[in-house]
Image (cartoon, rainbow, N blue to C red):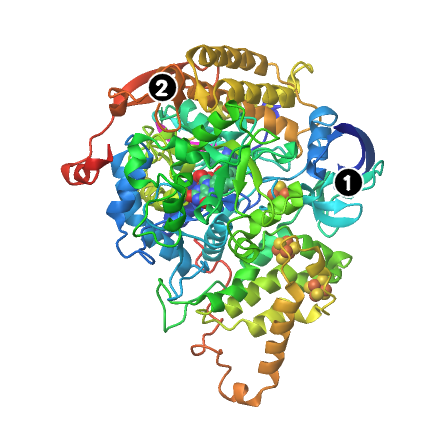
Amino acid sequence: MPSEETFEHHDYDVVVVGAGGAGLRAAIAAYEAGARTALICRSLLGKAHTVMAEGGIAAALGNLWPEDNWQVHFRDTMRGGKLLNHWRMAELHAKEAPERVYELEQWGALFDRTPAGKISQRDFGGHRYARLAHVGDRTGLEMIRALQQRAVSIGIDVFMELTVTDLLKDGERISGLLAYWRESGRFVVFQAPAVVLATGGIGKSWKVTSNSWECTGDGHAMAMRAGATLVNMEFVQFHPTGMVWPLSVRGLLVTESVRGDGGVLRNSENKRFMFDYIPEFFKAETADNIEEADRWYEDKRNNRRPPELLPRDEVARAINSEIKAGRGSPHGGVFLDIASRRTPEFIQRRLPSMYHQFKELADVDITKEPMEIGPTCHYAMGGVEVDPDTQASRVPGLYAAGEVAGGMHGANRLGGNSLSDLIVFGKRAGEYAAAYAKGLGTDRPQVATSDVTQATQDALAPFRGEAEENPYALHQELQETMQSLVGIIRVEDELRQALENIAALRERATRLTVEGNRQYNPGWHLALDLRNMLLVSEAVATAALERQESRGGHTRDDFPTTDPYWAKHNVVLALKQEGRQAPELEMKRQALPEPPPELAELLEDAH
Amino acid sequence: MSYDLKLRIWRGDANGGQLRDYVVQAEEGQVVLDAVHRTQATQANDLAVRWNCKAGKCGSCSAEVNGMPRLMCMTRLSTFEPGETITITPLRTFPVIRDLVTDVSFNYERARQVPPFTPTAKQPKAPFTMFQADVERSQEFRKCIECWLCQNTCHVVRDHEENKAAFAGPRFFIRYAELDMHPNDALDRKDYVQDEQGLGYCNITKCCTEVCPEHIKITDNAIIPMKERVADVKYDPLVRFLGRRSRRNGPESLKDWAPGAHHHA
Ligand SMILES: Cc1cc2nc3c(=O)[nH]c(=O)nc-3n(C[C@H](O)[C@H](O)[C@H](O)COP(=O)(O)OP(=O)(O)OC[C@H]3O[C@@H](n4cnc5c(N)ncnc54)[C@H](O)[C@@H]3O)c2cc1C
Ligand code: SF4
Ligand code: SF4
Ligand code: FES
């Protein structure tokens, strides 16, 4: 029990929480800036969700299209985000991504090449030019290995299978954090003036998702409990193509590269239905007939893009409508067909892991038959509100980068823009966190023992319960609620119902009980993750209720169009009172920052 | 269509344990990891198991299924006879932590000992010019998902704890091969692999290749060519005379490199 609990203690300048692309890059940057740096992750090193990324990293290298440059990338990103992105983040991202990609090559990454021996680039939805640096369809693995090998070779201290439960503060400022070893269940206190959150996404609160068990929104929730704000939480990306069958793999991602490389969507009537769903906003640049669309793969200069490559929100909604109209596939999806369009050799070479995935998990040979696919919860555009240059949150000493940070992608993220986001803003977060810690001199915040005692007591509560509520059952109920009430298409009644359900689940969560002991106990781990999932789910539903319009990853059946007021406003969320017990959300509308004239000009015809 | 599936799962920790029987509901199309999760959710909330992606991409869910080293998320239940009991045990080569979770830190220590990619003097700074045909050989090895199944299977360490101190194992041999075949790497790690990382212990039985879920030809494409190159250098008088130039751009020495050499005090 806490009073007898002995703590392992560590002292660092910068502690990075999360070892996906963002966390690894942040740790490298902080370390190289001279900070004593620790890197914490709750899985083994190299297993973070980033490893699953398939398609590529967006960067305007101009290797295939010399006319590509940061301005075009900036414009594409803002258009994809329905102009709700923080312009400064989109600018920095577009400008710095190429340099960050070359850095990966410098550290040993081996990207696929062009005939001229440069990094090859592939087409993806919403990007005007072929822009994604890639390695087959395992780009995330390449990124994580390159960063992991760099981090390890320079000697950064890595703490694996250590889960952070709470941030600690001294007055207004971050003083460190509390964590537990998964292996032993023992607690560890880190004293550090600067913490970089790089904990990734929130998808595990939905039933059909491409996300791994780690995506429970821990960083989002911990940041809020520490007094930071979240922005854009209503925008959740449903990737149009997840597997639908067998049930065991429902939600598993089918990379957008399938479409980039020639795959098309068909309904049960064998119709390429995307031509019926081209929105006004994208008419000028999208082919409106099959002949032009097919010519585009060969001659991109003189033809417009196929509608299958519209941004993800558009494609996901179209698929959803086809299924609802009764034109779906046998298992409740639609067909994604590359078999009839490309040779088996081409498919196996360009999409080896998709080939493998369908063959081994669904008995489907994608070189011979179409795939059955449907939308899957994929990415959180929303996250911790940060300063675009430094990635600092509102809490002194707290930084956030990668999927846990908000603002960069606005209402919808373009494919490939996450991996680039991780390295661009990971580096910035690490550097600024190091500079902040250094700037403190001897005036360093201290960890208060009473906070530690309280936090451990909370964490151990599930062992004291009387077998009342089972974490697995509760998790499943939360997933049902989010899936059916806060999914792709939303409506006021359902969102209110969702909030009621979440409140009831939160109440029940106070009586969670786990069996066994503290040693590597997944039931206990899930019980702790649940309070984060509940808080983040509430944030999503609350923001979704507030935004009375449809835009990007947020579609309201009762407000089906965009609204000029909401084009200029963000929903920002905080906790009324910091701390762990009975959190109450506070919401406000906040005016979107306006881009300076020279950037606004780039967006002129983008509205 | 759901049915009752018989599982036998090893439960215990470093102090010992035993196989326990479970009967769980299974569905068409499921994999072994689904059955383990079902057991965990309904009958053994504290059953310890590692997993992340459930798609064969992260290499977390390695275990021995009916004695075969496998990724649980890529092992379909339909590959077993109906009514067959499926036995799941932790990786044997690594010390058990709890249930199906083992202590694989050995591998992370070996990873720290790899002298990293070091660009040549000719192309010191990215972007590098490199051609697809030249990067492809190394790319095969970079498909490795670090599931440690090959490390678990290799007989050099599987039942010989004492060899671990001298032997990096197949996963790291492909890492050295990858660097060796990198078109723009300058370091010569041949002696190091042979003398410090135990390449010589390998007697090319190919058991590692057989279990690799990424189908990397560990023995044929990495280990054998490495062994040949080590032999070449060791017995080639001209190479000795020239001071063991690397095949590409001049000699680079490993003497300044040590794991974590730039580590803060
Ligand atoms: C299947 C799939 C394919 C994708 N493909 C692409 C693509 O092709 N291109 C692209 O740009 N994007 C892609 N994405 C999106 C992209 O991969 C993710 O957004 C990105 O990898 C997130 O990286 P991250 O560094 O923010 O976090 P993650 O990689 O999710 O890492 C999170 C880290 O935080 C740690 N962590 C979390 N909580 C805690 C805690 N409480 N204590 C300690 N540690 C904690 C985890 O252990 C982990 O190390 C894809 C996503 C999926 C799911
Ligand atoms: S080929 Fe070598 S490394 Fe592979 S299992 Fe046999 S002895 Fe071990
Ligand atoms: S080489 Fe193959 S078996 Fe070995 S760790 Fe890598 S992926 Fe696993
Ligand atoms: S869970 Fe990732 S490989 Fe099995």
Q: Which range is magenta?
A: A173-177
Please report, as a chain letter, where disc 1 is located. Answer: B
Residue A560 is marked as 2
Q: Is mark 2 within 8 Å of ligand 1?
A: no
- In this rendering, the answer to whether B124 lies above or below B76 is below
Which residue is drawn at the image coordinates 32% and 48% (left, top)? Answer: A303
- In this rendering, the answer to whether A251 lies above or below B201 is above
Query: Which residue is denoted by mark 1 in the rendering?
Result: B15
Which residue is drawn at the image coordinates 40% and 36% (left, top)? Answer: A195
Do residues under tags 2 and 1 come within 8 Å of each other at their CB atoms?
no
Q: Is residue A564 left or right of residue A552?
A: left
Q: Given the image, on which type of amino acid does mark 2 rest?
A: Pro
- Could you tell me if residue A40 is visible in this image? no
- In this rendering, the answer to whether A153 lies above or below A207 is below
Please report, as a chain letter, where disc 2 is located. Answer: A
Q: In the rendered view of the protein, which quadrant contains the N terminus of chain A?
A: top right
Q: In the rendered view of the protein, which quadrant contains the C terminus of chain A?
A: top left
Q: Is residue A592 left or right of residue A206?
A: left
What's the distance in space between the residues labelled 2 and 1, CA to CA? 61 Å
Secondary structure beneath label 2: loop
